[in-house]
Image: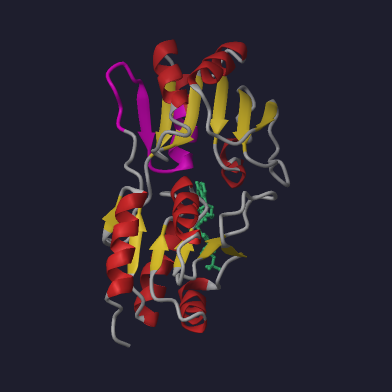
Amino acid sequence: MIILGGTTEGYALAEALASRPGVRVISSLAGRTDNPRLPAGETRVGGFGGAEGLADFLLTVQADAVIDATHPFAAAMGWNAHVGCAAAAVPLLRIERPAWQPQPGDQWFEADDWEGARARLLARGARRVLLALGRQELAPFAGLDDIHFLIRAVSAPDPMPPFADAELLLARGPFGLEDERALLAEHRIDTIVCKNSGGTATAAKLTAARERGIEVVMRRRPPRPQRPTVARVDEALAWLERKLDHPPEH
Ligand code: NAP
């Protein structure tokens, strides 16, 4: 079976399945980060070449199930999985952590894309902004020359977009509340820009922002195909057990 991974859930699934006798598990990573943490068990890295390439891959390795554990914002892979699994007649389950919801005291501005987030920073006159984004998502914010950006990313942007005033902080979650409080205070952050990833690993910044009374410009999740979806790893394992016990007829 195949795990489309790159997330906490993907790693946890691989870990849970690696030691099961008689189950061949291949985790797939896109290869976006220079130094990826490797999942337990077998791993392949790099794109498949669209839905068609994925279907070919599934047939080649004789996959009997796919779990799409990609990040909520990895929507292209979600659509490819939907189409590719249908083409190869392989059952597909989506595992997706619930989106964060605003809590009392939160000051969120929700945007559908980075252009909307950029416009919001300008409209509010933000001055010191934490960009908690992927390194491929920074470009829309370069050119806002009156803003000091603290860019937190897992690996360094290459090339770095032409920011007038930016500081790079390379760090991989999880991030604790004390550290997030200290970061916002030390850098006198007045706005956070992030996406609605959900989960606990990177949620502490939202609590720290609430306590500090600063705005969070939150990008909404992109649409994904309507698929059977579970929120937790144990539910995905239960689904898998049912599928592997009752394989579809080819
Ligand atoms: P994306 O925009 O949905 O996908 C773009 C292309 O990257 C896909 O069409 C596919 O290429 C390839 N790809 C994506 N995920 C893959 C995987 N697990 N295995 C093999 N190929 C994959 O994806 P993305 O947002 O760049 O995310 C890439 C990876 O990083 C995913 O594994 C995701 O779980 C992880 N991640 C993403 C985010 C995020 O915010 N986007 C955050 C944390 C982790 P082909 O069409 O050539 O097959």
Residue 209 percent coordinates (x, y): 44, 18
**Left or right: 183, with 73 as reference point:** right
Q: Is residue 123 visible?
A: no
The quadrant in which the C terminus is found is: bottom left
Residue 115 sits inside the magenta stretch: yes
Give the quarter of the image for residue 106.
Answer: top left
In this view, 176 is above or below 4: above
User: What is the image's colouring?
Assistant: secondary structure
Instruction: Check the image and report above or below for 22 versus 56.
Output: above
Q: Is residue 15 above or below residue 21?
A: above
Foreground residue among 194 and 239: 239
Q: Nearer the viewer, residue 112 or 98?
A: 98
Residue 102 horizontal/vertical position (percent) = 30, 27
Q: Residue at x 41, y 60 (%)?
A: 68
Over which residues does the magenta segment extend? 101-120
Q: Nearer the viewer, residue 89 or 104?
A: 89
- For the point 54% across and 33% down, which residue is it? 132
> In the rendered structure, does residue 116 fall within the stretch colored magenta?
yes
Q: Is residue 186 visible?
A: yes
Q: Quadrant of the N terminus?
A: bottom left
Residue 128: % across, % down: 58, 19
Image position of 174 (left or right of 63):
right
- In the picture shown, does residue 135 fall above or below 123? below
| Left or right: 250 in relation to 36 | left
Image coordinates of residue 160 in percent, x first then y, are 71, 41
Q: Which residue appears at 56% of the width and 54% of the height? A: 39
